[in-house]
Image: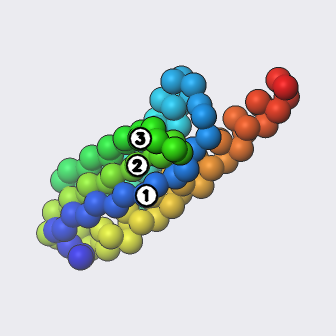
Amino acid sequence: MDEGSSGKRVIHIGLPELSEEQLIEIGELAQETIIDYVFDHLTRSEVKDIEVTMRINRGETLDLEIEVYLEVPIFVKVDVDKLIDEAVERAYERVETRLREIADEGKDKA
């Protein structure tokens, strides 16, 4: 998929037990990271549509599901799939770092 295409990616990140505020913070961090990454590589006029959706599933483990939809005009020469993969990977790294910080904060309180 190159020019004029769109893509969706979903990743699951196992999360520890978190408060509602922490869940919202993690979701917003991932979303902001993805959007910032895309706009670091493309101008606003090169993005026809972008949508980042977060879902939190509570089961045996807590999962953060990230879905990214990115559409660019046909004249924009970019590998949309690769850009989405890189943005999601960056979001995963930032979320992982924040989860470690939260875990460390929990140890300090114990």
The amino acid type found where label 2 is placed reads: Glu
Task: From the viewer's perspective, tell me whether residue 74 is left or right of residue 65.
Answer: left
Residue count near mark 2 (Cα–Cα under 10 Å), binned few <14, some 14–19, many ≥20: some
CA gap, disc 3 to disc 1? 12 Å
Q: Quadrant of residue 72?
A: bottom left
> Which residue matches tag 1?
11
Q: Nearer the viewer, mark 3 or mark 2?
A: 3
User: Percent position (x, y) of residue 31?
Assistant: 42, 43
Task: Identify the residue position indicated by label 2 in the image.
Answer: 65
Work out whether mark 3 precedes mark 1 in sequence or the reverse, and give the earlier one.
1
Closer to the chain start, of discs 3 and 2, is 3
**Residue at the front extreme, as displayed:** 60
Q: How is the image coloured?
A: rainbow
Q: Is residue 2 visible?
A: yes
* Percent position of residue 39, x then y: 38, 52
- Up the image or down, 11 lies above or below 22; here it is below
Left or right of 74, for residue 83? right
Give the percent coordinates (x, y) of residue 74.
14, 69
Give me the C-alpha separation between circle 3 and circle 2: 8 Å
1 and 2 marks in contact (CB < 8 Å): yes
Tell whether label 2 touches label 3 (CB within 8 Å).
yes
Classify mark 3: helix, strand or loop: strand
* Nearest to the observer: residue 39 or residue 10: 10
Type of amino acid under label 3: Asn
The residue to which callout 3 is attached is 57
The front one of 46 and 57 is: 57
Residue type at the position of mark 1: Ile
